[in-house]
Amino acid sequence: MTAGATTRRRVVILGAAGRDFHVFNTVYREDPSREVVAFTATQIPNIAGRAYPAALAGPLYPAGIPIEEETTLPRLLRDRGIDDAVFAYSDVPHGHVMHLASIALAAGADFSLPGPRATMIPSSRPVIAICAVRTGCGKSQVARWIASRLKARGLRVGVLRHPMPYGDLARQAVQRFATRADLDAADCTIEEREEYEPHIAAGGVVHAGVDYAAILRQAEAESDVILWDGGNNDFPFIRPDLLITLVDPLRPGHESAYHPGEAVLRMADVVLVAKANAAPAGAVEQVAAAAHVLNPGATLLRGASRITLEDAAAVRGRRVLVVEDGPTLTHGGMATGAGYAAAQAAGVAEIVDPRRSATPMMARVYAAFPHLGPVLPAMGYDPAQRAALAATIAASDADVVVSGTPADIAVIPGLGKPVVRARYAYEEVEQPALGGVVEDFLARRGL
C-alpha cells in the first residue's frame, strides 16, 4: 500500500469487463485521494477471480486490482471498509441498479454512477455515435450503413467498438482489426467476432480494447471521422458530435425501463425507431411517442431492418436449428432473433429445439435465461463454450443450421451440419431520413 493510503477513500467498482475498466481509467487511475480495492464482475463468465493488471492500473496499483464476483459485494463492503460503491455496467432494469444501491447504502457506503462528463474522452476528429436503449436494437447494422456512406465520400472511418476484453487484458489494451487474420491472432471470442467481422468484411477497420484514450489516439492517426459502435445500451466512451439512439418497437416500453438506455435516449440528437418494418404499426407509434416525451428536442426518424438468407432453397422444407446472436438473446431479453424470422419466412419444415440436444453447459444457459425460444444463443466466451455450442448442434436431429449471428460459426470445428447465414441490413423507409442527417452533419463539419 502506498504512503498515506489509509486516508484514501476506498472504492469498489461494479462492472462486467467493459465500462468498469473505462471508469477506472478515466476517473480513478491517477487519483491519489481514492483507492479502488476491487472490481466486481457479472454478465460475462470467467471474469471474476482474475485481476486488472498492474501494467494497466498504473503506479498507484503495483499489484493490480482483484476482480470478485458481484455476489460477494456485501462481504466486500463490510470486510474491506468500502466508502464508495460505483456502478459501471449496462443493460439492466432500473430496479437492478437500485437493489445494488440498497446493498451499498445498508453497509454505510455511498453509491454513484459516473456520468458522461466525467468519462467521455474528447476527440480531435468528428465523432458519430450509434447507441440504443437495449441490446439487439440494430446498432451495428446502422453503424455499418453509416460507415459505408462515409467511405463512399472518400473519408477514412475509424470504428471504435465498445469493449469486450475477455482475455489477457494487458495484451488487449489497444487492438486494431483490419482482417480476419487479426481476429485469429487475437483469439477473439464469438461475441467479439459478432461485432468485428461485419465491419471487416465491408472493408472497415475496428479499434477496441481496454485503454480508450490510447485506442482513440490510434484511430485518430488514420481516420477522418470516428464512428462509435456502441455495446449493450451504454453511452459512448468518446464524446460524440452526433449521437444517434435506437429504440426497438419489438420491445415497447423498454425505452424507459433500463439503465443506462433511458439516459442515452434522453441524450440523443437523433432517435431512430429501428425495425419499423418488422413490428406492428401500433408498437412503432408507441415507442416513437414515448421517445418524443423523453426527448422532445431530438430528430425522430424511422428505419427498417431487412433480413435475407444467403441460400433460402437450402433450408426450405428442411429441419433447421437456429443459432442467434448471444447477447441479444441473453441480457438483451429477446426470445428469438433474425435467424428465427429468416427460417420461418423461408418455409422450413421444422425449427428444431436445441434444448433436446443441449450439453450440460448449454442447458445451464437455458436455465439462466428461461425466456429463450427454440433457438441456440451463440455463446462462445471461451473454448469450452464454443465446444459446447458445437456439440449441441452436432447432436441435434436438424438437417441444416440457420445462423443469425454476424460471426461465421461455420469455422467452429465439430458442427457436423451445413450452415446457412441470415444477414440483416439497415434501410431507409421515409423522408426525412438518416442519410440526410448524416449529410447535414458532414456539411457542418466541412467534410
Image (tube, rainbow, N blue to C red):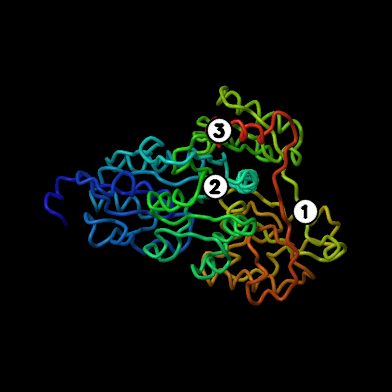
Verify CB contact (< 8 Å) between mark 2 and mark 3: no
9 vs 55: above or below: above
User: Three-letter amino acid code at disc 3?
Assistant: Ser
Q: Position of residue 87 (x, y in %)?
A: 39, 44
Q: Are the residues at dot 1 and dot 2 in contact (C-beta closer than 8 Å)?
A: no
Q: Residue at x 61, y 48 (%)?
A: 140
The residue wearing badge 3 is 256
Mark 1 is on which residue type?
A: Thr
The image quadrant that residue 387 belongs to is: bottom right
Q: Mark 1 or mark 3: which is in front?
A: 1
Going 28% across and 49% down the picture, which residue do you hit?
A: 29
Q: Is residue 349 left or right of residue 423?
A: right
**Which residue shows up at 64% across the image and 35% down it?**
272
Residue at which label 2 appears: 229
Which residue, given by chain and number where applicable, does mark 1 sit on? 308
Q: Quadrant of the N terminus?
A: bottom left
Label 1 vs 3, first from the N-terminus: 3
- Left or right? Give the position of 207 relative to 424: left
Seen from the viewer's position, the closer of residues 88 and 200 is 200
Mark earlier in primary sequence (1, 2): 2
The Cα atoms of the two marked residues, 2 and 3, are separated by: 21 Å
